Amino acid sequence: MTKEVNKPKDWEITEALGNLTCTSTRCEDNLHCFLRNMRKKVNRAKSYRNNTCVGCGKDVIDWNRIDMHNLEDKNYFVDCLKKETWRNAVWNLEIPQYMAKASSELNIDEMRLRVFNLLSNKINKKRSEIFRDGTQTPVGLKIIFLAQHATGTCCRRCIEEWYGIDRNEIMNNEDINFLSEMILIYIKQKVSLRNQPKEQKI
């Protein structure tokens, strides 16, 4: 008789994402990466944003438009995020039932407050003050964590890459509110909140 193996709670997510990381590219499928690799030679004056794909050099994002942080342009933001290999995979994930159930117990205002507090407490520090920036947001366990990875709000380097917010500066409330709303776009498309059904996909 085969002994049943207890799988971790988020095994479906880790299995679906496989070996993908935020530096993965699949340029032949028009899936890119815009995160500059600065592991070998760190230049503090340089941004983590690579304006073109680090794999193929294609220029497919209007970064000036992104940097306006205009939420009325959210459809464009989401389209751009989905052009990155890692984030595209997270946008296309099936959300596990345990996440959907936990989310359904919160209304939109309660979820927004949780997101704002998480960004304020866990992410809003200078990158130099964060131990191993880039690893502070797990993949799985909570819908907010998935939403952070999908929207490039999981760490200071990804926030700098996607939204042009300097990793070496403390963010203001306007920045945090904007990033919170980006996270909520993902959440509202993926799960039903209390008294609010899922929104149509962008």
Image (cartoon, rainbow, N blue to C red):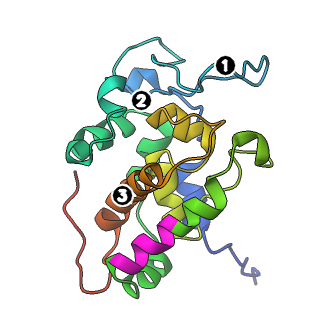
Name the residue beneath numbered marker 1.
45
If you read the primary sequence from the N terminus, does the residue marked by circle 2 or circle 3 appear first? 2
User: How far apart in space, not on screen, are marks 1 and 2 (Cα)?
Assistant: 28 Å
Name the residue beneath numbered marker 3.
181
Q: Is residue 2 magenta?
A: no
Q: Is residue 64 above or below residue 165?
A: above
Query: Could you tell me if the residues under marks 2 and 3 are in contact, i.e. CB atoms within 8 Å?
Result: no
Is 124 situated left or right of 106 in this image? Answer: right
In percent of width and height, residue 174 lies at 42, 51
The local crowd at label 2, few if under 14, some if 14 to 19, many if 20 or more residues have their Cα within 10 Å, is many
SS at circle 2: loop
Q: Is residue 152 above or below residue 37?
A: below
User: How far apart in space, not on screen, are marks 1 and 3 (Cα)?
Assistant: 29 Å
Name the residue beneath numbered marker 2.
31
For badge 2, the amino acid type reads Leu
Q: Is residue 115 magenta?
A: yes
Q: What's drawn in magenta, residue-wise?
A: 109-116
In percent of width and height, residue 182 lies at 37, 53
If you read the primary sequence from the N terminus, does the residue marked by circle 1 or circle 2 appear first? 2
Residue 163, picture quadrant: top left
**Where residue 12 is drawn, which disc sits there?**
none
